[in-house]
Amino acid sequence: MSFLYSCKDVTNVASKMEEGKLSLFNRLRFRVHLFICDACKNFIAQYDQLKTAIKQSTPDLKLNDDAKQAIIERIRQIEN
């Protein structure tokens, strides 16, 4: 295992990073990669803009915890 994440790794763990589900070591790997990779910096910026746009376009949408967990699990299945 390399210390640095690959670009593919960064895209795969972006949601886990946001959820706070990465260890300190893996958060460091994520941040170091973003420090040196402009393409991934742009990806994360676009990812954040997309999340913001979705939240703004559906302000009244409320999901219960079970629905949120089901969505998260489905995304993880697709990522793997």
Image (tube, rainbow, N blue to C red):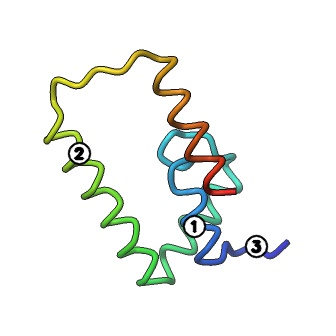
Residue at the spot of label 3: 3
Q: Which mark is residue 75?
A: none
Mark 1, other Cα within 10 Å: few <14 / some 14–19 / many ≥20 = many
Q: Closer to the N terminus: mark 3 or mark 1?
A: 3
Residue at the spot of label 2: 54
SS label for mark 3: loop
Mark 2, other Cα within 10 Å: few <14 / some 14–19 / many ≥20 = few
Q: At 70% from the left edge and 57% from the top edge, which residue is drawn?
A: 80
Where is residue 48? Give x, y as percent: 31, 56
Where is residue 29? Give x, y as percent: 65, 65
Q: Quadrant of residue 33?
A: bottom right
38 or 58, nearer to the observer: 58
Q: Quadrant of residue 57?
A: top left
**Amino acid type, mark 1:** Val
Q: At 54% from the left edge and 27% from the top edge, which residue is drawn?
A: 69
Where is residue 28? Give x, y as percent: 62, 61
Residue at the spot of label 1: 10
